[in-house]
Image: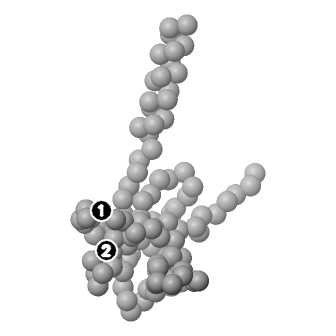
Amino acid sequence: MKKIYIIIIMAISLQAFSQNHQNFVFDFDKKTDEIVFRKNTKKQEISGFKILTNNRKVFFSSNSINDNSKLEINTTREQLNAILQNDNANQAYHFFVYLKDKNKYYSVDHIVRKISCE
């Protein structure tokens, strides 16, 4: 019984640490990207961003980050294109958009993953 308990704990801990969360922070470009605002609200709230990647705009839904932590922009537009092309549901990526004019970071996610049925 003790061996089974140890095996279960090891399996759970390996699964918890096996997910590699990578953060990708990229800069919002006013010339090519656009902000999508929520409708039916009194003040303008950002619901997401349309980011130009691979010659098409991909919608990223967003949530603002309220803490004052500074994130370093570590992803170029070309790198973002490659990440989105090779994305699948098994990868745990965290995307952040930085708006220079508001000096604010937004946690974003996209829903362009393909679902394959077997």
| Rendered position, 110 above or below 8 | below
Residue at x-position 52% and y-position 21%:
8
Q: Quadrant of residue 71?
A: bottom left
Identify residue for label 1.
67
Residue 22 in view, yes or no: yes
| Rendered position, 46 above or below 88 | below
Residue 14's mark?
none
Residue at x-position 45% and y-position 73%:
81
Q: Secondary structure at mark 2?
A: strand
Q: Which of labels 1 and 2 is toward the front?
A: 1
The quadrant of the picture occupied by the N terminus is: top right
Q: Residue furthest bottom?
A: 31
Whole-percent x and y of residue 39?
Answer: 57, 83
Identify residue for label 2.
104
Mark pair 1, 2: CA separation: 10 Å
Disc 2 marks which amino acid? Lys
| Rendered position, 59 above or below 19 | below
Colour option used: one colour
Residue 36 in view, yes or no: no
Residue at x-position 54% and y-position 13%:
4
Q: Is residue 99 left or right of residue 39?
A: left
| Rendered position, 107 above or below 32 | above
Whole-percent x and y of residue 98?
Answer: 33, 74
